Image (tube, grey):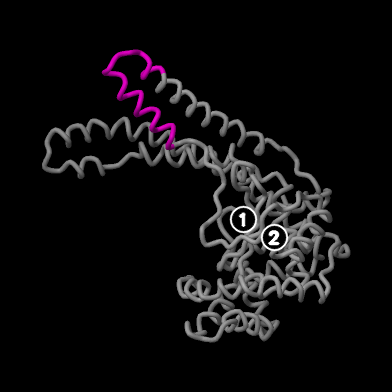
Amino acid sequence: MHERLCRTEVARPSRDAAWVFTYVLAGCVHAVTVAVAVLGIWLCLTGRLVLVPLGLLALAIVVLLRPRLGKIDPEVELLDRDEAPQLYALCDAVADAIGARHIAQIGLDPDFNAYYTVAGIRQRPTMVLGAPLWTVLDRQGRVALLGHELGHGANGDNRQGVFVGGALRALARWYELVRPGRDSVFAARGNPLGMIAGLLLLIPQAIVGGALYCVIVAFALVSLRVGQRAEYLADAMAVRAGGRSAARALLETFLVTGTLLRAGRLVPRNAPAGESYAAIVAHAAELPATEKDRLVRQGRMRQHRVDSSHPPTAMRLDHVASRPDEPARVVLDAGQAAAIDAELAAPLARLERQFRDLVREYQV
């Protein structure tokens, strides 16, 4: 797939069969939710008292399955434009360079990652930057990271929205409600009537739960294809924004995450402020080229990926390497980089203690 993407202009996504199919499946899921809502209202309005509880139950299920608006994690520290004007200016320049929407909100969190999402009633485009990842990247690596994340706003990853994302979450809740299992039987142990009722429910639970599971798997597989294609497109936008070498360095940083975090883990909890970030930056700078190559090869063998929605990092590196080596459209100079560092100094310091706690929980 990535070879075909290399030969195309990256500014806009194609609406292929998988992309369309995700909307069809999402529409079916939401249609079922609407049907249950109509049924619940009808049962409540029939005037028969025996049906009203069933109607209220149906409406309660609809409330549970309603599409959720994107929500920002409480540990994310949001920055407005007045707090970080230089960072927002850089993001706007990157967005203009790759043909993406300007970001509405930027947040920082203590994780070694970054992501793009939409949040709130207005579906505001939001980018969250992991404090340790941002710290360890060089100037052009940061531009490539912004290009990648902002690229998700323009590359057709429809799982970010309320319609498709809400359908996926609704399916998961449906399965939780009717999943086949013996929990209800064991919960009623000692109550003969309850055990009989639980046993009678096992068969319909198994049928409905199994069918829902098949739908979830099909939906996930199709949406994963859309998401993985979106990653390749976002990587191409990282090349466009920051240059090919910067995009490659960004991906290699994910491959050496384990060794960087082990360096951060050695820093005591009561160390002076900035020591954790300094430790991973120093370790990254001191990492020999041979060790980096070894970790890259190891990542290839293990099919390393950031998470299950991403293609293997090695394939993404191959895709980046096959892109034309065009000049970076955005160059972050030392002056603007220093201004951004000054803007982020206080929030990065506040997040460092959380990072120190998190780094001890990483499985590295």
- Examine the structure image and report whether residue 301 is included in the region drawn in magenta: no
Question: Residue at the top extreme?
Answer: 47
Q: How crowded is mark 2: few (under 14 residues within 10 Å), some or many (20 or more)?
A: many
Q: Which residue is drawn at 66% across and 34% down?
A: 20
**Closer to the camera in the image, 148 or 346:** 346
**Closer to the camera in the image, 196 or 292:** 196
Question: Residue at the right extreme?
Answer: 327
Horizontal and vertical percent for residue 235? Answer: 73, 58
Label whose residue precedes the other's in the sequence (2 or 1): 1
- Examine the structure image and report whether residue 60 is included in the region drawn in magenta: yes
Question: Residue at the front extreme?
Answer: 82
**Could you say which quadrant of the image residue 83 lies in?**
bottom right
Instruction: Please determine whether, in this image, residue 118 is positioned above or below residue 211.
Output: below
Horizontal and vertical percent for residue 104? Answer: 69, 52
Q: Which residue is drawn at 69% across and 57% down?
A: 149
The disc placed on residue 310 is 1
**Closer to the camera in the image, 197 or 40:** 40
Amino acid carrying mark 2 in the image:
Arg
Q: Which residue is drawn at 72% across and 37% down?
A: 15
Real-space Cα separation, disc 2 to disc 1, in angstroms: 9 Å
Q: Residues within 10 Å of mark 1 (few under 14, many from 20)?
A: some
**Could you say which quadrant of the image residue 17 lies in?**
top right
Q: What element carries label 1?
A: loop
Q: What stretch is highlighted in magenta?
A: 42-64
Horizontal and vertical percent for residue 268? Answer: 48, 85
Instruction: Please determine whether, in this image, residue 198 is positioned above or below residue 306.
Output: above
Amino acid carrying mark 1 in the image:
His
Horizontal and vertical percent for residue 130? Answer: 61, 66
Q: Is residue 344 left or right of residue 112?
A: right
- The mark tally for this picture is 2
In this figure, which residue is indicated by the disc labeled 2? 316
Q: CB under 8 Å between callouts 2 and 1?
A: yes
